[in-house]
Image: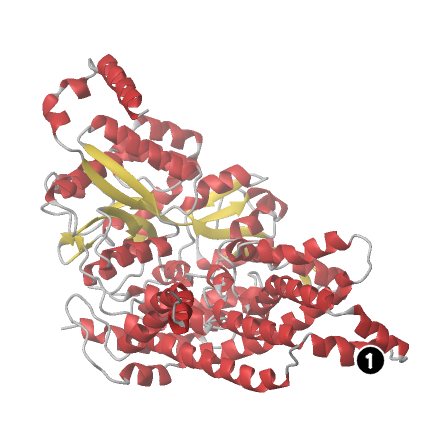
């Protein structure tokens, strides 16, 4: 007796769908639903308030600052970590002495838990005797800088950690993709007399397209998601200079216990991510060359 | 396998049958009361071992009660975990949480006052320093029992004092003297500073350290009912100006935000000669400072002063009558003078009752290490740490204002007015 095709398909999809629905789709919809009510307290049950929670967000200067900070954070970390990952992958892909050691060195930050990384960097950034200040003094002759304690540098300092943490992880994907490029293509190009730069631009980079798209989507998601180091190091300070959407959601939800407002914030974050993902897949996806 | 194990246990029980616990059939027949006790420790280490020891000793003395201690991370994590669990119907029975969480816990309706619980006598609740009780009582009821309590003190490097021509036994007593000392202690080589005169941490919870300055400037930040703040008082802006001037005008204090976590390290590295931090750091500094250091009360402005800080013991509403009674027993056990004295000696936290300081072991300790008594002596001038309804939000308004000023984005007076406006917006509905 043959199973109908559709039953077979649903059986295969079932377990994954069930998990996704239970832990992603249902909570997301529930959050959007809760955002339409006020925060319940023991004395005041939740009442329907329509879009009031979103209106309150629009009037909240910290929300706008967090949104702006997050856009800067994404713009700073995404291209930087992709470029660095590609550069590192190209380097350790070549014939190089101590290649394995280099690969491990680049990959190590990825393995460390973010909380440990944050505590490590807290001391790197310490003014005067921290490692960063010692380096800038030695190489550039700068005086002490309060990296995470001043408005101008705090967000940049947080971005540097994110890039440092992520580039090694993305490098692994590039490395795998580089090794999957058939050598015959590269040999053919060099037989035609193409320079190394030209081979990179016209052969290697296009063939890495699908990997770049994958990495770009992940990097963007991470730029909204990976905020542990900020909670440890600055708690969004000084004066909200490092507040991102996610840290603000956590603060509103679990420090102020304003769950309705936090739900509305989550709604905004979901919308932002959905728009970016749609743009990436439609614009970049169209130009990506799949074999 | 299971039979042999049971037989083995039976045999060992037989051997122990003479012990008083097993000889009392009434106790054995009753199922023990299990008390879940949340305690704010992030990772193991000395304090976790001390608390484990207390739990074991208590269980030995009270065979009918079992303590299940749960270590819940930082204070911030601990209140989050306790409230999340309470909302999910699985609250702890007892927890050590910040004294400033009192209004939040009351508003969430998850705790009960200690008054009226079996065994909680007025004499016991009145045995603690009044300075600690300010944050433990509201509306005539006692909601928290002081346990892991602290206050801010100044630590200074005696060698640096000598090098600057200052008497290493005398700390600055007034605001003016503090600036003068700090100027002498600041060492410059060209444009760079090799040693700052002093530093007051301003990351994370700057309001706590700032509250020392406002208290010294003779102004309160909030009322006792926790539904009004006074951030816009001119004396508050004045206190902030003093802090700002240390960095901007006198140039004896690092600019921008000073990290709380690395401040003791800055002190060990001789990057700063005088620091403000919690008494809870006393043991850490005693162990790690590579030079002779002094501990002093904070310098006085119009008057001396510091806020208290740290954690209180709370009983949760969901605990049964039997568990509430057990919680009282355990809290009384933890705060017995002898034990409180040992706790203070082991950790640097301030033993919370005058009787603890009268014990022989505490007297001996203070005689050998007088710095230990500084925090206690300062308690006379201590005020309650900033705490209101919707505490985190109201405090954040002040924190943001302070950091805006310290990082040069705003001036004291407008920043404090803005913080007050925000606090007012939040607290209005808790009045009248």
Task: Read off the chain for label 1.
Answer: A
Name the quadrant of the N terminus of chain B: top left
Q: Residues within 10 Å of mark 1 (few under 14, many from 20)?
A: few
Name the quadrant of the C terminus of chain B: bottom left
Residue B26 coordinates in the image, percent (x, y)? 9, 25
How many numbered circles does the render carry?
A: 1
Q: What residue lies at 18% left-to-right and 21% top-to-bottom? A: B21
Residue B324 coordinates in the image, percent (x, y)? 15, 43
Q: What residue lies at 45% left-to-right and 45% top-to-bottom? A: B281
- In this picture the colour scheme is secondary structure
| Camera-nearest residue between A5 and B79 | A5
Query: Would you say residue A135 is visible in this rendering?
Result: yes
Q: Is residue A50 above or below residue B58?
A: below
Tell me the quarter of the picture where residue B109 sits: bottom left
Q: Please name the residue that numbered disc 1 is placed on.
A: A198
| Camera-nearest residue between A290 and A122 | A290
Q: What residue lies at 39% left-to-right and 73% top-to-bottom? A: A6
Residue A138 coordinates in the image, percent (x, y)? 75, 60
| Camera-nearest residue between B301 and B10 | B10
Left or right of residue A142: residue A1: left
Residue B150 coordinates in the image, percent (x, y)? 36, 47
Query: Would you say residue A250 is visible in this rendering?
Result: no
| Camera-nearest residue between A121 and B125 | A121
Tell me the quarter of the picture where residue B22 sits: top left
Tell me the quarter of the picture where residue B28 sits: top left
Q: What residue lies at 34% left-to-right and 43% top-to-bottom? A: B377
């Amino acid at each position: 007796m043959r199973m109908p095709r559709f039953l077979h398909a649903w059986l295969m999809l079932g377990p994954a769908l069930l998990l996704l629905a239970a832990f992603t789709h249902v909570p997301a919809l529930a959050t959007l639903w809760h955002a339409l009510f006020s925060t319940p307290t023991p004395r005041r049950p939740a009442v329907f308030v329509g879009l009031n929670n979103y209106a309150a967000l629009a009037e909240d200067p910290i929300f706008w600052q967090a949104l702006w900070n997050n856009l800067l954070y994404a713009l700073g970390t995404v291209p930087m970590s992709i470029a660095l990952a590609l550069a590192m992958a190209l380097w350790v892909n070549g014939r190089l002495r101590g290649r394995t050691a280099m690969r491990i060195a680049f990959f190590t930050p990825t393995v460390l838990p973010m909380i440990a990384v944050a505590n490590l960097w807290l001391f790197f950034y310490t003014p005067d005797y921290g490692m960063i200040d010692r380096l800038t003094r030695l190489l550039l002759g700068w005086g002490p800088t309060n990296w995470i304690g001043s408005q101008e540098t705090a967000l940049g300092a947080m971005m540097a950690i994110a890039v440092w943490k992520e580039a090694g992880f993305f490098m692994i994907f590039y490395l795998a993709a580089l090794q999957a490029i058939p050598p015959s293509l590269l040999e053919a190009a060099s037989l035609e007399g193409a320079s190394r730069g030209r081979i990179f631009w016209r052969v290697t980079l296009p063939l890495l397209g699908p990997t770049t798209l994958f990495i770009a989507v992940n990097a963007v998601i991470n730029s909204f998601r990976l905020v542990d180091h900020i909670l440890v190091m600055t708690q969004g300070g000084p004066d909200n200079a490092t507040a991102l959407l996610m840290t603000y959601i956590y603060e509103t939800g679990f420090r102020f216990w304003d769950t309705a407002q936090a739900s509305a914030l989550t709604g905004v974050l979901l919308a932002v991510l959905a728009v970016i993902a749609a743009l990436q897949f439609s614009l970049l996806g169209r130009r990506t060359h799949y074999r | 396998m299971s039979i042999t194990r049971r037989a083995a246990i039976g045999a060992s029980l037989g051997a122990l049958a003479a012990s008083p616990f097993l000889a009392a059939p009434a106790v054995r027949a009753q199922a023990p009361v299990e008390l879940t006790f949340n305690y704010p420790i992030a990772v193991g280490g000395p304090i976790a071992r001390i608390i484990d020891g207390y739990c074991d000793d208590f269980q030995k003395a009270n065979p009918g009660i079992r303590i299940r201690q749960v270590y819940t991370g930082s204070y911030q994590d601990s209140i989050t975990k306790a409230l999340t669990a309470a909302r999910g119907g699985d609250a702890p029975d007892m927890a050590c949480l910040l004294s400033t969480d009192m209004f939040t816990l009351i508003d969430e309706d998850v705790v009960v006052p200690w008054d009226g619980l079996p065994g909680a006598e007025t004499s016991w609740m009145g045995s603690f320093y009044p300075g600690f009780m300010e944050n433990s009582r509201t509306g005539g009821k006692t909601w928290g029992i002081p346990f892991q309590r602290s206050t801010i003190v100044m630590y200074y490097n005696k060698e640096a004092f000598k090098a600057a021509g200052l008497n290493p036994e005398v700390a600055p007593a007034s605001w003016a003297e503090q600036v003068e000392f700090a100027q002498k202690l600041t060492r410059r080589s060209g444009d760079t500073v090799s040693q700052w005169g002093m530093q007051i941490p301003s990351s994370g919870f700057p309001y706590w350290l700032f509250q020392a300055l406002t208290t010294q400037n003779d102004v309160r930040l909030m009322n006792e009912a926790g539904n009004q703040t006074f951030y816009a008082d001119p004396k508050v802006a004045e206190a902030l100006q003093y802090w700002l001037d240390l960095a901007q005008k006198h140039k004896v204090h690092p600019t921008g935000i000073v990290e709380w976590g690395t401040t003791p390290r800055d002190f060990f590295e001789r990057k700063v000669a005088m620091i403000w931090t919690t008494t809870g750091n006393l043991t850490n500094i005693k162990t790690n400072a590579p030079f002779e250091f002094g501990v002093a009360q904070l310098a006085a402005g119009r008057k001396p002063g510091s806020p208290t800080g740290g954690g209180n013991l709370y009983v949760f509403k969901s605990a049964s009558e039997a568990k509430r009674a057990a919680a009282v027993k355990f809290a009384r056990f933890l705060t017995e003078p002898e034990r409180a004295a040992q706790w203070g000696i082991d950790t640097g936290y301030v033993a919370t009752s005058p009787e603890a300081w009268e014990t022989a072991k505490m007297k001996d300790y203070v005689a050998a290490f007088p710095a230990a008594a500084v925090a206690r002596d300062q308690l006379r001038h201590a005020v309650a740490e900033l705490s209101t309804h919707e505490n985190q939000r109201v405090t954040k308004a002040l924190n943001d204002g302070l950091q805006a000023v310290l990082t040069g984005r705003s001036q004291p007076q407008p920043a404090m007015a803005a913080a007050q406006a925000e606090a007012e917006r939040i607290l209005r509905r808790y009045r009248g």
